[in-house]
Image (spheres, rainbow, N blue to C red):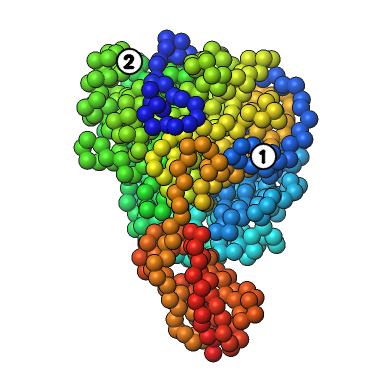
Amino acid sequence: MLAAAICTSGFAQKRVVVTKEMKSAVVTTEKPSPVRISDGAEVPARTFNSPENMVNNFSSAKADGYDEYRIADTYYDLQSNSTISNRIALWPDGTAAFVATMEVEEDSGYPNRGTGYNYYDGEGVGDIPEERVEPMRSGWPTICAYGNGELLASHASGTNVYYRPTKGEGDWELIYTFPAMTWPRMAVSGPNHEYVHIVAADQETGTNKNFLYYSRSTDGGHTWSDPIDPLGTDNEPEGIYKNNLGADDYVIATNGNNVAILFGSYTTEMFYIISHDNGETWERQNVTKYPVPGVHSILFADYPTGMEDTLFTSDNSHSIAIDNNGVVHVAFGLKAWAPSDAEHYHNWTTYNHGILYWNSEYVNEQGGHEIPLFGDWSGDADLIAEDPTLIYNGENGIANTLLLQRLDALAEADGFQHLDFFGYQVDEDGDGEWNYEHINVDGLVTYRTNGLTTLPGISIDERGNMAIIYNTPSEVRFNEENEVAYRSAWVTMRDYTGTWFYDHVNLSTDFTHQKKEVYATTSCQQGQNNKFWFTYSEDRTQGLYLDEDQTELSVNNIIAVNLDADAFEGWNVNEAVNPMTAARVYPNPATTTLNVEVNASQISDVNMSVFNIMGQKVAEKNGSLNAGINTLSINTNELSSGVYFVTVKANGFDKTMKFVVK
């Protein structure tokens, strides 16, 4: 059994068994348009009856190991066309900010759509927002901490960047507009978070062409470099990605000077580009190649006529994070599909589903880091010998690289440290089996990601602990009226020793969630001292209103979750390490600038506070430390002559140094 090898707690997982029912449970779906529609349907309509109305008196709840906060309500229920990221900002003092696409009026035209914002001050969150942040109709927000302030980007006709100097309060200032960029993702990097990065998309009106953009700011978002295509010409119609990468097919992560952008969809391979110098230069790394050997992406027209081989790919949802050692961590949902004609494809949702985890320290038998194509791993022969019909490498050369049995075996061969596969069997009722019949594929809602288990979000703290949120249909929460299982939010965790806690936290067990559907799930990429922030969207009506033929709008609650891993039995607590091996200040006395030099043993966030002789705080600055010598500066221009103290805090440790301003 997979879980028995290293899991000490949580629901057990079994070796994968594919049944005839799973193989035959096929849904035929209309081919999505390559152009994303911000307010329209992309999949065939499916009718759902609204479940019984419930009185929503849920404001906050505390369960063992985590707190929940209702941060926003919205009638607009499409949080993303596919993957979601960069919706949570976290500061070194433990405060956090959350954003979501929000509409406060029960109007299917969504005239007031925009960013719903809320702030956690260390004790609780603010009131449910009643109006959007932006002055115009907007959507798809992304937020990040910038010093003691915050940066927000969202798209209207283009991407707008907003700033305010104090987190959680004050007016937002529109500081920049990208006319042609939409569906943005934004992040900050550098010793003092001085570099701001945006990756976004655009679509040429009246065509199916997708364009990707990347831009960087070095002055807090006030000015930006000219937007460039981060893939060069690779995403052109005649390029290797055949124009298949578009809106929301990317996520961005940063840590220290490292910046990584992950790309992927069900018609392309999964890969990322990474910069170790804040976006100056870039490298490329595959996570997994496309299942057609030698092909980076595929169009329906490229698929050989009459070919019946199934493609095992990403389901269009993926997540990325970078830890303090510079290791890149990736998770994505899985999908099994095959074109049926020029306009439709078959989707075997239950045949291949789960969350695949990979990190950049994984090494295959050829010495590379990507998951090996089917046929390139020595264990493939054993899988075929065990069941020749299970692993099928057909006449047309389809490589079943991401078949769930193979992923399970690859993870076991790796020791579950750099590659793992979970979330495909959650035994909620404790009968020792995953009851597939509860899912009822005829009424199955797969939404835009087309995966049964989908939308993972990775969070990693400074000690190397990790938590991954995702959503999947429940085995026990079932809508009898429309015969569809409700979706639930789950969290799988791994502590710094490499011990996994599979499907360990079910966020949908409380009675307030019993008749609620979870779809969107996302994470803050950085955890803090064994604590992790997540958000999820919860609705009393199953299905997405924009995509389904529903008779009424219903409100979605956006829930923030603060999970404390220390509360769980078996969790190995990694005592905090002081990253500051040495520190000094110069010049001393200072005139206009005080330099704080810190020799750090590891990457860490850092806070510097200046106090006068009376103990009053007179200046503060947040930043980050990289391993090695770091020089951070504080402006002393506005300080009067006298004696001061600067306290440097990193990873829970602090060092205070005296200096003089003359």
Q: Could you tell me if residue 618 is visible in this image?
A: no
* Between marks 2 and 1 in the image, the one whose residue lies nearer the viewer: 1
Q: Which residue is mark 1?
A: 62
Residue 420 in picture, x, y percent from top left: 38, 33
Residue under the image location 69 percent in, 50 percent down: 124
Q: Which mark is residue 390?
A: 2
Q: Using the image, determine if residue 147 lies above or below residue 274.
A: below
Residue under the image location 24 percent in, 15 percent down: 385
* Residue projecting furthest to the top: 20
Residue 83 in picture, x, y percent from top left: 51, 38
Q: Using the image, determine if residue 86 lies above or below residue 623.
A: above
Q: Which mark is residue 297?
A: none
Mark 2 and mark 1 residues within 8 Å of each other at the beta carbon? no
Which residue is more in the foreground, 451 or 508? 508
Element on which disc 2 rests: loop
Which residue is more in the foreground, 301 or 614? 614
User: Could you tell me the amino acid type at mark 1?
Assistant: Lys
As measured in the structure, the alpha-carbon distance from the residue carrying label 2 to the one carrying label 1 is 45 Å
Residue under the image location 28 percent in, 33 percent down: 372
Question: Does residue 546 appear to the left or right of 531 in the view shown?
Answer: right
Within-10-Å neighbours for mark 1: few <14, some 14–19, many 20+? few
